[in-house]
Structures are given as structure tokens and as C-alpha cells.
């Protein structure tokens, strides 16, 4: 817009100034060619005509002055436009550099948050009921799944709920993470069938269910179905105990809800 405005301003100023110059020349030529007699012998019509011509000439001179002022203002405007163009050109490099820096920062952020790692270790865990007061749910995120029963009297290796329906173990991840895998170590010395029927949720989305008794369960989330969650919930709807050795949640993040990469 700035580039196209400058020639228009110049053309307007030159055209207007030339038009009024031509008008003033025509009026002067008209007076010379009339060859009027002395003013004392003029009729009323002639006097009126000459007064009108004089007024027109005065207006033409005034208009020419106005045009000159407008031309000066337009030239000043042109100078300002030129300064603005210079400033815009000088900022293009800075804008390009800032855009490049932002692209680099976002790329680094994506690389840092896309690393799949263990995100459940030592996180806060809640349980809906207790079979024994010392069998706390924090035991499922303590990183210990080698021992599945007491080796010494004071050792506790797994939590245990009562056997009422709808028991839950909830792992609070502490942020919004993309979930890639949930791995569950069942107790090994007995009672593995107690875990059958347990559903695993990432927030409200179910990602797996235990359909048979076995020592280890692995629930993978498909790459083409990104799942984001703040909590992992193990929900046993049946009237059974929930007692497991360890839960590992593998994921990437944390992410801002408005800035998800997938």
C-alpha cells in the first residue's frame, strides 16, 4: 500500500497545481483580448462582468496558494512514508530472526516432551478401601516388584483393598501426559485371579481390562490414537481384593492442554 501511494500523491499534486496555473493564464489572456474601453464608459453589465472576472481571478490565486500548501503537505507526507518504509525494512530482519528463534524453541520443546519415560514413580496414589492399615497404595509406585511377599516380618510389598465391589487405585501423575503404556505386576505367591475383571483407565478412557490371571499385564496405547491423561485408574467392579505389586506408567509430557503436539 505504501509503495503504490507515493506515485498517486505526486500525480495528484502536479495535476492540481497545473490545472490552476492554466486557469489563471486563461483569465489573464481573456482580459488582454477583451480590449475594453475606459472604465468611465462601462455599462452596468460590463462593470458587473469585470467585477466577476476580478473575483474569479482572486479565487484562482487563492486556490493556487492552497494547492501549493497541499503540495507541500503531500511532499512532507511522502517523506514520512519513506521513513516508514525504511523502518519496516529495517525490522524485517529482526522479525525473521524472532520467527526462527520461536521455531527452534518449539522444536526443542517437542523433543524434550516427546521422550517416552516412566512417569508414575513415586507419584501420589489413592485407594478406596483398606484390608490392612499398613498396606498402602503408595507401594504400587515405589519401584519395588522383585519381592511379592514378606521376607522379614516388617516388610510390606503390596497394597490391599477390602473385597467390596468397585474398589479403585488411582495414580495422580501431576500433569497432563500422553500415555503410551501401563504395566501391572500381579502378586505371584497366590490369588492372581483377584485381578481378573480390573479395568485400566487413563482419566475416563479405558485402555485395557484384565481378562485372565497372569503375573504381568501390559496395556499399550496405539500410536495412531493419542491418549492424554492426568490420572491412571485401576477399577475392580467385582467383589474382589485389589492387591498388586507394582504399576508402571510410561508416557511423555507434561503438556499444556492448548499445546498438544499429537
Image (cartoon, rainbow, N blue to C red):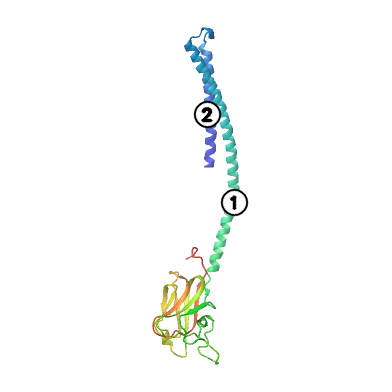
Separation of marks 1 and 2 at Cα, in angstroms: 40 Å
In the displayed orientation, state which residue is furthest to the top: 41
The one nearer the camera, 114 or 44, is: 44
Q: Is residue 215 above or below residue 72?
A: below
Of the two numbered discs 1 and 2 in the rendering, the one whose residue sits closer to the viewer? 2
Q: Residue at position x 45%, y 81% from top?
A: 217
39, above or below 133, in the image: above
Mark closest to the chain's N terminus, 1 or 2: 2
Residue at 51 percent of width and 16 percent of height:
51
Packing grade of label 2 (10 A; few <14, some 14-19, many >=20) is: some
Residue 124 x, y percent position in the rendering: 52, 77
Element on which disc 2 rests = helix
Residue 53 x/y as whole percent: 51, 17
- Report which residue position mark 1 lands on: 93
Q: Nearer the viewer, residue 45 or 92?
A: 45
The residue identified by callout 2 is 16
Residue 187, given in percent of the width and then of the height, sits at 47, 87
Amino acid at each position: 500500500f505504501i509503495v503504490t501511494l507515493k506515485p498517486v500523491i505526486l500525480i495528484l499534486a502536479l495535476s492540481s497545481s497545473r490545472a490552476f496555473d492554466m486557469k489563471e493564464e486563461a483569465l489573464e489572456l481573456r482580459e488582454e483580448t477583451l480590449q475594453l474601453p475606459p472604465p468611465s464608459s462601462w455599462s452596468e453589465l460590463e462593470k458587473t462582468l469585470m467585477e466577476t472576472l476580478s473575483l474569479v481571478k482572486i479565487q484562482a490565486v487563492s486556490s493556487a496558494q492552497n494547492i501549493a500548501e497541499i503540495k507541500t503537505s503531500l511532499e512532507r507526507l511522502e517523506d514520512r512514508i519513506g521513513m516508514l518504509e525504511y523502518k519496516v525494512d529495517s525490522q524485517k530482519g529482526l522479525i525473521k530472526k524472532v520467527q526462527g528463534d520461536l521455531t527452534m524453541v518449539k522444536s526443542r520443546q517437542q523433543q524434550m516432551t516427546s521422550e517416552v519415560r516412566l512417569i508414575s514413580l513415586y507419584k501420589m496414589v489413592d485407594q478406596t478401601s483398606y484390608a490392612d492399615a499398613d498396606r498402602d497404595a503408595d507401594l504400587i509406585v515405589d519401584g519395588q516388584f522383585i519381592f511379592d511377599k514378606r521376607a522379614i516380618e516388617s516388610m510390606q510389598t503390596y497394597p490391599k483393598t477390602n473385597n467390596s465391589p468397585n474398589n479403585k487405585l488411582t495414580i495422580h501423575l501431576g500433569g497432563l501426559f500422553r500415555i503410551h503404556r501401563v504395566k501391572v505386576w500381579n502378586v505371584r505367591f497366590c490369588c492372581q485371579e483377584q485381578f481378573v475383571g480390573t479395568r485400566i483407565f487413563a482419566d475416563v478412557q479405558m485402555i485395557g481390562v484384565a481378562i485372565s490371571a497372569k503375573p504381568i499385564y501390559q496395556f499399550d496405547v496405539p500410536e495412531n490414537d493419542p491418549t492424554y491423561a492426568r490420572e491412571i485408574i485401576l477399577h475392580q467392579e467385582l467383589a474382589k481384593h485389589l492387591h498388586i505389586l507394582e504399576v508402571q506408567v510410561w508416557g511423555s509430557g507434561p503438556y499444556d492442554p492448548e499445546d498438544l503436539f499429537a
